Every structure is written in C-alpha cells, then in structure tokens.
Amino acid sequence: MKTFFDCIACFVRQSLDAVRMTTPDEAIHERLLREVLRFLAEMDMRQSPPAMAKRIHRLIREMTGQSDPYRDVKERFNRLAMDIYPELEARVGRSANPLDTAVRLAIAGNVIDSGVNHHLRDEQVHEAIDHALDAPFEADLAAFEKATSSAKDILYLADNAGEIVFDRLLIEQLLAEKITVAVKGSPIINDATMEDAEATGMTELVEVIDNGSDAPGTILEDCSDAFRRRFDKADMVIAKGQGNYETLSEVDKDIFFILKAKCPVIARDLGCAVGSLVLQQSGETG
Amino acid sequence: MKTFFDCIACFVRQSLDAVRMTTPDEAIHERLLREVLRFLAEMDMRQSPPAMAKRIHRLIREMTGQSDPYRDVKERFNRLAMDIYPELEARVGRSANPLDTAVRLAIAGNVIDSGVNHHLRDEQVHEAIDHALDAPFEADLAAFEKATSSAKDILYLADNAGEIVFDRLLIEQLLAEKITVAVKGSPIINDATMEDAEATGMTELVEVIDNGSDAPGTILEDCSDAFRRRFDKADMVIAKGQGNYETLSEVDKDIFFILKAKCPVIARDLGCAVGSLVLQQSGETG
C-alpha cells in the first residue's frame, strides 16, 4: 500500500510522540520535527507508510542517541500480556470454536501498537479483548483453517511486543512443527524483536527468526537474504498487523493478514470500518 | 498563544482538508502538501497558530486560484443558523436567566469551525446546542454582566459564519448602541466577513466593521489602522472563538474570551477539559 496524503499528519504526530518519550528536551523535539517536516516535504509517496516510518524513527534514534527508545514500553506490554495469558488460554480451551476464539484474541493483541496509539492504557487492552470476543467477524475462517492444515511450512510474521503473547494463543492452535515466527531485525517503534520472543517464551514454542530489517512492517528488499529465502520457501504466510498489511498487500504470495483496522486509511483500503477485526487472504478485495 | 508542537500535525491535516475542498486534482493536493511541509519546517514557532494558518490558506488560495474556497460552507451554516434562530431566540426569551442562556448559545455556535472540524454535520450543531444548554459552566457571569453594563464602548470580535447568528442572541441581551461587531477583512477559512454580517442581518442590528486582515484570529499588527484605533478605543472587548483567544490572550486589554475549547492544546492552555464552555476574562489563569 502506498502512503496516502492522510498519513502525513499522522507521521508528524507519531514523530512528536516518539521523540517526547526519549527526552524532555524541547530543543531536540523542535529539531526533530523540523527534520521530519523537511524529509516529508521531499519524500517519495509511492513508498509504503512503514518505509517512511523507518526513516523517521532512524532520525529519532540518531538525534537522541537511544538505540531502543521503546524498550520500556515493550517490556511493560510483554508483562501485561503474560499476566493475562493463562486466563486467555483457558478461554480458548473452553470455547466451542477454539480457532475462532484464538484468532479473535490474536487480533485483540494488535491494539498494542505504539505507532497508532502512543498512550495506550492497560484497560484499553482489556477493552480490546472484550470487543474482539463479541464483535462481528466476517472472515472465512474455514479457508484459513484449510490453508493451515494443508500448508507444510507456515511463516508467521509477528508484529508488536505484548501482542506476540496473544499470537501464542493462535500458534498453539496450529501444528508447532510447521511454524516459524519472524520478528524484526532491530528495534523499531514497539515491534517485537528476538528479545521479546525470548522474554515471552515464543522461542520455546516454535522456531523464531529475525527478518534483518528495522522497518515496522515487512519490506522484502530491506530484509536479510536468509529471511527472504525463508519467505520464498513458505507455502503460507500469516502476517500480523497494519505494517505487514501495508508492506505486503501487493506481494504475489499466499498471505493471510490478521489485524485490527485501527486507522481510516487502512480501513478504507480494506473496505471495512475503523475498529474492525480483519482476517483477509491476499488477493481478496475488501 | 504561541504555536505548540502539537499544532503542526493539525496544520498538515487542515491543509489537506482545505485543498481537497477546492479541487479533486491530486497533483495539486500533493504540491500544496509539500509546500506546506516546507513552510512548516522553517517556520517561526513563536508565532500564534492563526499566523501560521493565514500563510497556509494564502498558499491554498494562490495555488487553486480560488479567492474564497469556503464560500459555500459559510452560506450553508448561515442558512442553518438563520433557520433555527427564531427557536433559539424564544428559548432565550423564556429563560430564567436570559444572559446565561444567550452566552451558552453563543458558545454552542462556536462549534461551526471548519479549521477544527472540516466535516461538521448539521446534527452536530444541534448536539452542540443541547450540550451548551446543559453543560456545567463555571464562568463568572456576574463579572461579565457588570463589565458590559459599565462599558461605554464594546468591541465584539466575531469568529465564524453561521456562528455569527448565534452571536446575535448575545448581542441582543446587551445595549446595541454601544456595540461594534468586527469581522475579517477578507476570506480565511469559514471566518465571517462583511458578506456574512449582511446576509445574517447583523448589519441591521449594530455597527459592523472589518479588521482589514485575513488571519483566522486578531493579529493586531496585521489589522488595518482604522481597526486598531477602534480596538484601542473600546473599553471592553468580547472575543469569540479559539483564533481570537490564540492571538489576543497575551494582549494587555480587558478582553472576555467566549469559546468552546475544541482542541487539547487550547484546553490545556485554558486549564479546562476539551469540549468545555469557556467565558474567561483576560488575565485570569485557567
């Protein structure tokens, strides 16, 4: 998905949120903002939003000298998710349709997105869980189930820290031995890296690799050769979150996108309302 | 009030809203956006938000060749307000405290602000009226009433088209002969100009002057000499709306600001919640 004009105001807001988190120094906030505005004024709008965000967050890391500004945020949400995990697991276990419940909860976890909502409160995570369990969900779950059964090699592209714990619920519904989970190669916003996969026990459950990139999505040409080979070899890809949708929606591959549509631009592209639960196969029109 | 960093994303959003209204040509949208981003990257942040908005909307008018892009919007809200005016007037008439009701309704009219909400629907105006009549309102109305009684020369700075009809309700509670209403010198967003004052009957009620400026507020150094003399001479100023607050809150003059706090930056500056009804005398701290 290309960057829409509507994304630009959001980049500016996101930059300010991010730099404020790293330092209270207003002179740095101003320098960063001016730098981001200059960058946006000249940018190539055919690129996807994560390609833009990658550049902006590199600027922030360089300007503040902090290599992982969201580390605390990531740890906070990993802990929160681990705390409620046993309850969610029990909920899936007693569901009449465990796969449906697990997919819904994996989508609920996608609310933990510091790019979209920098000020997420714990109770909003709980609200997202309640909403996901109740909301209409028009996905073709049968097609998803069939694809997971027949696939021999599933690549699961994780999105954010904290959210990755919710992904475990879904991964446990599938055959662990055919799944590889991919995290980001280095810190970008609150996206999960290997550190988060280890902290949340994902590495004990399935093979986890990193994609070699610091984009908040999956820009294939930006990923490592090893990751790209793994991507090519997989006969099914499960891609979590908006960033992966934005970067992979036009890639020719059998991909199931699982996300909560959190912004109007994505919702319009998907043909759904903001807040909708989405499980969509690549090539489907919204 | 200076421009806060938080205002910048809002300027970008506002620019896009405005240029989209003037033309469906995406090449012009992109050119305007890039130009606005370049301007914002180099701007002097000590200026008030209306000083920035003035520059941005001049760019839009130049780029699209439309001297008054919001003309239709202004006419639409003048008509809407004129249609409900008799009902509101009756409401003030039968109120136990007509001044309180008139001030509340004048604040309700301040919701008609295309800079803040470009997509305002008619029902949102009706909701704002219901809200204003019911909401807590902690203003020192007695001080306001006393000031209007003792003042000999009141300058009433109008804000937007449509809203100006709501201002009539308040002006009718005061002595018409001591009031002068000021509108903008030329079109800027949906701010009222002389055309709106005439269309809504304001010119038949009181003297109406224009301020000679195209800023969405009152930047004194940008106004005509005639207006500045009128401003200096007035012993009381009633200033409607966010733009007038942003440009006059630090001016040494007895000013009563009447507005609805529609954005978080203004609300923080005033020390109130977003959505609050505000009647505040200059020099008071929020």
Image (tube, coloured by chain):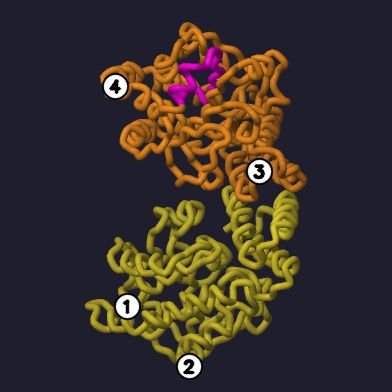
Chain colours: A orange, B yellow
Type of amino acid under label 3? Thr
Residue in front for this viewpoint, B216 or A173: A173
- The residue lying at 68 percent from left, 18 percent from top is A228
Do tags 2 and 4 sit on the same chain? no
Q: In front: A174, or A142?
A: A142
Report which residue position mark 4 lands on: A91
Q: Which mark is residue B204?
A: 2
Tell me the number on the disc at residue A3: 3
Instruction: Give neighbour class at mark 1: few <14, some 14-19, many 20+ (Cα, 10 Å).
Output: many
| Residue nearer the viewer, A173 or A47 | A173
**Residue A111 rendering spot, x and y as whole percentages:** 45, 33
- Amino acid on which the number 2 mark rests in the picture: Glu
In the rendered view, does A130 fall on the left or right side of B75?
left
Asked whether the beta carbons under mark 1 and mark 2 sit within 8 Å of each other, the answer is no
Q: Tell me whether marks 1 and 4 sit on the same chain.
A: no
**Tag 1: residue type?**
Leu
Question: On screen, B222 above or below B268?
Answer: below
Q: State the CA–CA distance, disc 3 to disc 4.
A: 38 Å
Q: Amino acid at mark 4?
A: Arg
- Chain for numbered disc 3: A
Q: Please report, as a chain letter, where disc 2 is located.
A: B
Neighbourhood count class around disc 4 (C-alpha, 10 Å): few under 14, some 14–19, many 20 upward: some
Q: Residues within 10 Å of mark 2 (few under 14, many from 20)?
A: few
- Local SS, label 1: helix
Is residue B106 one of those drawn in magenta?
Answer: no
The residue that appears at 51% across and 46% down in the rendered structure is A271
Whole-angstrom CA distance, mark 2 to mark 4, is 70 Å
Q: Determine which of the numbered discs, if any, sits on residue B99 in the image.
A: 1
Point out residue A174 in the picture as x, y percentages from the top left corner: 43, 15
* Residue B274 visible in the snapshot: yes
B36 to the left or right of B136 = right
Per the rendered image, the range of residues in magenta is A144-163
